[in-house]
Image (spheres, grey):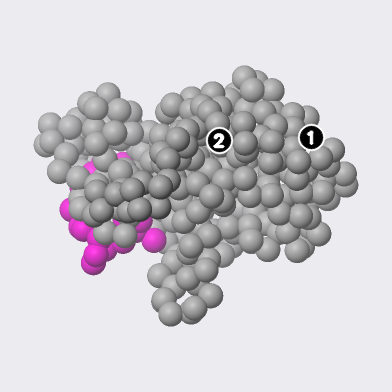
Amino acid sequence: GKTILNRFVRDLCDCAGDWNMPDYVDEAIGRVRSEVGSDEVILGLSGGVDSSVVAALLHRAIGTQLTCVFVDNGLLRLNEAEQVMQTFADNLGVKVIHVDARDRFMNELAGVTDPEQKRKIIGREFVHVFQEEAEKLPKAKWLAQGTIYPDVIESASAKTKKAHTIKSHHNVGGLPDTLHLKLLEPLRELFKDEVRELGVALGLPHDMVYRHPFPGPGLGVRILGEVKREYADLLRLADAIFIEELRTSGWYEKTSQAFTVFLPVKSVGVMGDGRTYDYVVALRAVVTSDFMTAHWAELPYSLLGKVSNRIINEVRGINRVVYDISGKPPATIEWE
């Protein structure tokens, strides 16, 4: 298939394969400067690949005209807030407003167990927090977003209303109208692999650019049922151990996505001479080319055993670890 397309594009259409990232960086910077002029731009920085690359690109293009808003909702990965601030504020010199909204999000999520409801609450609160911060920046005329080409395709497909909604997407699509800002989407022509390549070209850390996908609602949809601060703290530690061991063993790059899920059930265990009654976590790792279908990653038993032992011994409150061997379909990659 690729050979046929290659011949069609090069031989029949007479196209040249001279596209390269350094040239694209220069073109993208030029377009941003031309479009924005001397206006100020505001960006919601999540720490994910897309928004991180947008932040680096815009900072290179317009410098202090960019202000990023980073919202800590209490549902981030271990040390993620510190890493984002260090990378962008300290190392790159980007102007970043760090909003600690952990209590606010936890209060809104109290007692909520339905996955769709959790997603909507997290998305709504992010919009509210972002809007409050944006109103403190009256000179901002543009809202930048990390929209990439697959998002454009998905949005166009959604207008046909022919597909069922499996999970609502966490985004800030309503912000431009609400804030009366013009929309700036410098990545909307790029696919994910090109976005990663652009991030490296802009000097972002390789581990940040090539990290696995992380859902917009964060740990909120990796904690089954009600979200509690205690659950999030336990999950953060367990997930960090899993990812660390995947990297150390060389399996992180061999898997497309890997993470830990917190199960709000307790099981009996034994620790030393005593009985324990603690929580369960599930490990999930998949291999996929397009995320539409996926196969569970056949991780070595020795690796799974090491991860399990470390989590149970190092994370007080967890005494059982299971491994998810479900494919997509019928299961989705995320549990919620």
Q: Residue at x 79, y 34 (%)?
A: 65
Seen from the viewer's position, the closer of residues 273 and 197 is 197
Which residues lie in the magenta part?
A: 318-336
Q: Residue at x 44, y 26 (%)?
A: 206
Q: Locate the N terminus by quadrant.
A: bottom left
Q: Nearer the viewer, mark 2 or mark 1?
A: 2
Seen from the viewer's position, the closer of residues 108 and 251 is 251
Q: Which disc is residue 24 wearing?
A: 2
Tell whether position 324 is magenta: yes
Residue 124: image location, x then y, percent: 64, 61
Q: Amino acid at mark 2?
A: Tyr
Q: Amino acid at mark 1?
A: Gln
Q: Residue at x 54, y 23 (%)?
A: 203
Q: Residue at x 73, y 59 (%)?
A: 176
**Quick one: which residue is furthest to the right in this view?**
138
Mark 1 neighbour class, 10 Å CA radius: few under 14, some 14 to 19, many 20 or more:
some
Secondary structure, magenta segment, majority class: loop
Kindly indicate whether the residue at mark 1 contacts the one at mark 2 (C-beta within 8 angstroms).
Answer: no
Above or below 60: residue 319: below
Q: Is residue 236 visible?
A: no
**Residue 115 falls in image quadrant:** bottom left
Q: Which residue is mark 1?
A: 65
Residue 295: image location, x then y, percent: 20, 53
Mark 2 neighbour class, 10 Å CA radius: few under 14, some 14 to 19, many 20 or more:
few
Quick check: 270 left or right of 214? left
Quick check: 241 left or right of 36? left
SS class, disc 1: helix
Residue 279: image location, x then y, percent: 32, 48
Quick check: 61 left or right of 304? right
Sequence-wise, which precedes: disc 2 or disc 1?
2
